[in-house]
Every structure is written in structure tokens, then in C-alpha cells.
Image: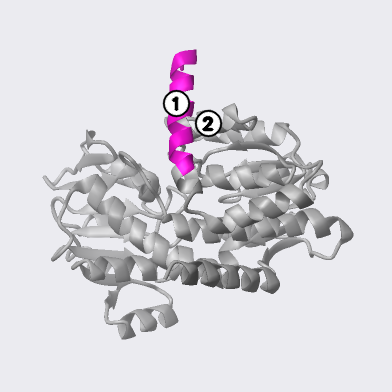
Amino acid sequence: MTDTQMTDAAASGARRVEWIRSRMPLLAQAREEFARSKPFAGHRIGMSLHVEPKTAVLVETLAAGGAEIVGTGNHGSTQDDVVAYLNGQGMTIFGRRDDDLEQHHANVLRVLDAQPSILLDNGGDLAAGVVARGVTGSILGGTEETTSGGDRLRTELAGQVPFPVIVINDSLLKQIGENKHAVGQSVAESFMRITNLMMPGTRFVVVGYGWCGRGVAHYLRSLGGKVAVAEIDELKAFEAALDGFRVSTAVDLAPWADVVITATGRPNVVGAAVFERMHDGAILANCGHFPWEIDVPALLASSTSSRAVDDAIDRIELPDGRHLVLIAQGRMFNLAGRSPKGNSIQSMDLGFLLQTLSLERVALEAASGSLPAGAQPVPDDIERTIARRMLAAMSAAE
């Protein structure tokens, strides 16, 4: 960008952040408390997180607590005007909207090059980078935002992370407020915004009935969609059935589906066996953190051609004459397309307060050894404090 473009982008980001900030009372209270207590004084927080206006309010809150912030966005969701705004406020934020996956990984390494003492991670990229470099001893601790990142910490990185990582997604408060209700709402909104298709009567298959899948299924149905659930866990499948959804496997439901939406956090849950059975013009979309739930390489390898037909919409031609539609190239489509909004402001106020108070706990207690190493849930007292604050904020609005 030219200097003029950067100035214009920063001004745009400032206007958008101002609106978001005015609707996040929980972070406003934390910002006032941190301005007095300075829990992050002397700490550099390394961040890998979706960079959009709500994230900017989180970053401002941490900075008010004395933190130096060095961060990057996540692949495909970075909003350039918000990056410009934050960099203009003295932060160091890497990344652009059009960065490819290789550049994203390079941005993660640039964050680690800054030698942060605390990590604010999303998807486990920073933790994996620290382990790969063998510099775990320089990290006091951190947080992890997502299901996908929590899974990485407990599988791929199990036993290799000698510092505490509080997994925000383990919080029941987040699972209810953000994963179920906010993701459910944002998936429905994003589908309508990106495709401009009618919801009532459309046949949706939601793959996965965890907290995000629950919310997606319920919100789609509330807007008139016909919804089925693909779930391999017997207990979750049982719950989906009692909630009134048709339940089967993704392969069995594929011919029926107009739209397949993945919400599992696991790789390749929708692959060739599903593609082969989907009808002409059916749509594939993913709302999980990593762009791996739909086996996009297999889909493209089996196609005769692929072309973009609109922002965040690709038409994939198949040898038998059918075509499938892929949303956001298999990335998390809640933050894709024109004018992406993501999860609701109130839900992220709650979710980011979980981040904020968990990071404060790491800064104040990790060095004492009172927090065990590795992945762990949000402390119960933090969850209950935030629940009380959220209820008070909701009651004040009545």
C-alpha cells in the first residue's frame, strides 16, 4: 500500500473498531481495571488470531494492561484496514487478506522471532512453532482459542509443551455463548450474504454435532432450512436425533444435500466418497478453523476445471458433467466474502474476556508453578466471574 492508502485504511479500521468497542462492555470494564493493575507490564504477547474489529478491542485491552503486542492474522481472514489501524496504534501486526498459507506460516515465524513471553494462539500454530524451534523455555504460558488447537495440543503436541496453555474452547461459557449461538448465527448470515440463496426449503447437511454443529443446525432450521446431521459419535448422534434432526453418515446424506457444512475441527471428514454422490450444483462449505475438513485437494484433482464465479464462490466442474460449488476454498467461511462480520459482538465480548482474564492468570501465576504444563481448561472462578458479568450486562439492557 502507498502511504495514502495506509492512512485511508487505518481511518476505515478506526471507524469500524469504534462501533465494535462501544458494544463490548465486558472488555471495557477489563480495560479500566488493567489500566490500574498493569498485569502484563514487561511482557510481550505473541498473537496468532483472526484480525478483525473485535480482535482489535481485545488487543487494546491487553495493551492497556501493559502488554507489548506482536501478532499476525489467520490464513484468509485478515482484514487489512484493522491491521493498518492497530499498527498505527503502536502494535506490530503482520499479515494481509490475500496472504497464501505459506506466507501465513512465515508470519507466524516472524511473531516467534520477536521472542514473546506469552502466547495468544488460535489453531496451535504458535505452540507448534515454539516446539519445532526448541525454544519452549522462553515462554511463560499462553492461551489457545479453538477446538482444533486444543486437539493439536493433546495429540500432535502432547507432552512437548512444558508451559501451561489455557484452552478457551474448553469453557462451557464459550461453548454455549460463542460456539453454539454465535457460530450458528454467523454461519446462517454468512451463507445468505455470500450466496444470496433462499434458506427456507434448502436441504442442509451439518457434519458434526459438537457445540458449533449444534448451533449451525438449530439456526439453519429456525430460518426454514431442512436440516440433517452427519455424526459418527453415537451419543452426539443420539442427541441430534432427539433434537429432531435426520441423522446418518455424510456419505448416505450426500445425495439429499443441497448444502454440506462441516463443523468438526477434524481433517478430511468430507472427501471423495461424498463428492461422488452429491447432486449437480450442490454446495460445500466449512466453518471449522483449519481449511482441511473438506478434502479440497481431492476435489480439485478429480475435476476437469475450477473457476471463481463470485467473491468466495468457486465452481468445480466434474468429469461426469456435474458441478459442485465450493465456498471460500474450504476455509472458514464465517469470515469470508464481502463485508465479513464473523461471530456476534456480544459473544466475542464474552469470549475475549475469557481470553483476557486467562492471559492475566498466566501472567500472574504461571511462573510460580501453580498452573500445570500443557493444555488445561479455563479456571472455574474465571468462568463464573464472567458469567455474572455477562448476566449483569444483559439485565442492564432489559
Q: Is residue 49 left or right of residue 140?
A: left
Please identify the quarter of the rendering in which residue 199 is found.
bottom left
Q: Camera-side residue: 6 or 393?
A: 393
Per the rendering, the mark at residue 85 is: 2
Q: For the view shown, which residue lies furthest in the right direction?
A: 368
Q: Is any atom of residue 270 visible in this view?
A: no
Residue 260's spot in the image, x, y percent? Answer: 27, 59
Which residue is painted at 48% across and 41% down in the image? 18
Callout 2: 10 Å neighbours few (<14), some, many (20+)?
A: many
Instruction: Determine if the magenta segment contains residue 298.
Output: no
Relative to 57, residue 203 above or below: below
Instruction: Please name the residue that numbered disc 1 is placed on.
Output: 9
Magenta-drawn segment: 1-18
Measured in 3D between alpha carbons, the distance from the residue under mark 2 to the one under mark 1, in whole angstroms, is: 7 Å
Q: Would residue 136 be seen by someone viewing this image from the given angle?
A: yes
| Percent of width and height locating residue 59 | 61, 43
| Residue nearest the viewer, comparing 119 with 43 | 43
The image shows residue 287, relative to residue 92, as above or below, that is below
Does the magenta stretch mainly form a helix, a strand or a loop? Answer: helix
Residue at screen point 22% across, 66% down: 223
Quadrant where the C terminus is found in the figure: bottom left
Among the two numbered marks 2 and 1 on one chain, the one whose residue lies closer to the N terminus: 1
Q: Residue at x 52, y 66 (%)?
A: 393
Q: Which amino acid is tagged 1?
A: Ala
Residue 148 image position (x, y, % from top left): 53, 57
